[in-house]
Image: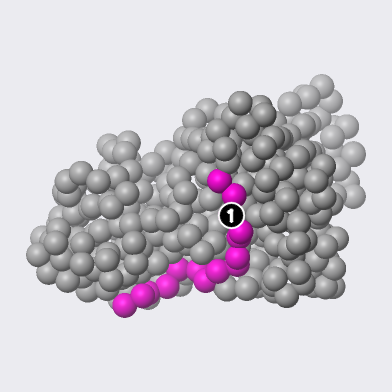
């Protein structure tokens, strides 16, 4: 659904055209998984898939929400009744953003919102962050709040952590808010410093495929939270603020200090080596050695599979099949337990790789995955 259709649907729902339409993208993470809540490094880029929001202000303390994707009637909420834990449906994400803005001291008096999205849900591509960021940007503009993009991302993260109850890091919201077309975002999640790294695969005869396994995951569930708690335990045992503070050169010594804490050892080893992989990829891309990042991506998958233990049968099948058929590198992307994998390949190999992956899923009796090309796209922005 494009901007015109979103505008028309808004008018049908609310009786007048919206004051504006905004867009925010999903993201794919090139490298740097489960490092963001450890104050580490990440490297996402924005997808062309995006969430659109048609929005108008209200002055009566009401928030009215409608989604073209969910359907049903308009949901009406009172701003003075918004509170964490009161909503467990899709409306918790936009409502949580409004709650976070108000909690931060910004005067929001209400809004009418109509949403439509092409970001696949449950695929590890940050559909929830796109939903949060597009609402935050719309309200920032409509209420002249003057908040920088990184501050909007922080507020959206707080909405998801506290209001929704999902213990996510800052990467997804920052990627949706701050990415630039044709670039990957090298983000230090400790101080939120950013560097846009040129990432034009087409110019080099390369493609990055996203393979959506159609296996859904849920961040609010216990496994994601267990990994985060384990990382925090590792940092406490090692006497550092976050695992980011363990240098790669000192990893062996740090692991020795953890003794028989086998689960914590695995988590620490992944985070420290993954931070190092992000830095390696940045260095290779800046040196123009794009093909050389392939093995680093594959190393990252092995670490997520064996140490962090967040892969699954379907993700491993994508990676193994892609590598066996000539891919330069492949790995799961996102939180894990399902979702998507990425495959770096020569442009001439894309059709054969796609066919091989689909055939492998069929042979294994699995649902055919969705495969599409990931093109670095713009971050959140107004459309009208």
- Residue 54 lies, with reference to residue 337, above or below; the image says below
Q: Position of residue 12 (x, y in %)?
A: 14, 62
- Left of 33 or right of it: where is 99? left
The answer to whether any part of residue 172 appears in the image is yes
Q: Position of residue 21 (x, y in %)?
A: 30, 70
Which residue carries the number 1 mark?
A: 372
Report the front residue among 61 and 196: 196
The segment highlighted magenta reads 370-384
**Label tally:** 1
Image point 19% across, 55% down: which residue? Answer: 63
Within the magenta stretch, is there residue 382? Answer: yes
Within the magenta stretch, is there residue 131? Answer: no
- Residue 1 lies, with reference to residue 266, above or below; the image says below
Report the front residue among 39 and 17: 17
Q: Residue furthest top?
A: 260
Other-residue count near label 1 (Cα within 10 Å), few / some / many at <14 / 14–19 / ≥20? some
Image point 55% across, 69% down: which residue? Answer: 377
Q: Position of residue 253 (x, y in %)?
A: 90, 39
The answer to whether any part of residue 152 appears in the image is no
Which quadrant of the figure has residue 384? bottom left
Q: Position of residue 181 (x, y in %)?
A: 57, 73
- Left of 82 or right of it: where is 216? right
In the rendered image, the quadrant that contains the N terminus is bottom left
Which quadrant of the figure has residue 229? top right
Image point 37% across, 74% down: which residue? Answer: 382
- Residue 198 lies, with reference to residue 362, above or below; the image says below
Q: Secondary structure at mark 1?
A: strand
Image point 53% across, 44% down: which residue? Answer: 123
Q: What predominant SS class does the magenta segment belong to?
A: loop
Report the front residue among 240 and 136: 136
């Amino acid at each position: 659904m494009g901007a015109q259709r979103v505008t028309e649907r808004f008018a049908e729902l609310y009786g007048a055209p919206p004051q504006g339409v905004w867009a925010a993208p999903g993201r794919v993470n090139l490298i740097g998984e489960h490092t963001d809540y450890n104050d580490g490094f990440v490297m996402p880029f924005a997808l062309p898939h995006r969430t659109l929001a048609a929005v108008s202000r209200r002055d009566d303390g009401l928030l009215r929400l409608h989604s073209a994707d969910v359907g049903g009637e308009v949901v009406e909420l009172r701003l003075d009744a918004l509170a964490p834990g009161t909503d467990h449906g899709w409306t918790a994400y936009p409502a949580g953003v409004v709650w976070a803005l108000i909690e931060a001291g910004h005067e929001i008096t209400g809004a009418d919102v109509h949403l439509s999205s092409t970001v696949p849900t449950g695929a590890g591509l940050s559909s929830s962050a796109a939903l949060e960021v597009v609402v935050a940007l719309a309200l920032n503009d409509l209420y002249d709040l003057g908040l920088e993009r990184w501050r909007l991302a922080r507020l959206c993260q707080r909405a998801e952590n506290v209001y929704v109850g999902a213990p996510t890091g800052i990467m997804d919201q920052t990627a949706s808010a701050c990415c630039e077309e044709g670039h990957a975002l090298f983000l230090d999640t400790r101080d939120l410093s950013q560097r846009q790294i040129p990432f034009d695969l087409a110019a080099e005869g390369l493609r990055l495929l996203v393979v959506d396994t159609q296996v859904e995951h849920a961040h609010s569930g216990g496994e994601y939270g267990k990994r985060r708690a384990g990382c925090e335990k590792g940092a406490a045992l090692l006497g550092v603020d976050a695992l980011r503070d363990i240098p790669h050169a000192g990893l062996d010594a740090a692991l020795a200090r953890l003794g028989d804490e086998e689960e914590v050892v695995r988590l620490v080893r992944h985070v420290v080596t993954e931070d190092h992989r992000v830095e390696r990829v940045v260095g290779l891309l800046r040196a123009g050695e794009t093909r050389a990042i392939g093995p680093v991506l594959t190393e990252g998958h092995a670490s997520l599979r064996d140490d962090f233990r967040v892969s699954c049968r379907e993700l491993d099948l994508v990676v193994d099949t892609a590598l066996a058929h000539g891919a330069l590198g492949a790995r799961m992307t996102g939180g894990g337990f399902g979702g998507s994998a990425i495959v770096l390949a020569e442009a001439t190999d894309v059709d054969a790789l796609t066919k091989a992956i689909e055939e492998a899923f069929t042979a294994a009796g699995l649902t055919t995955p969705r495969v599409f090309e990931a093109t670095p796209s713009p971050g959140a922005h107004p459309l009208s």
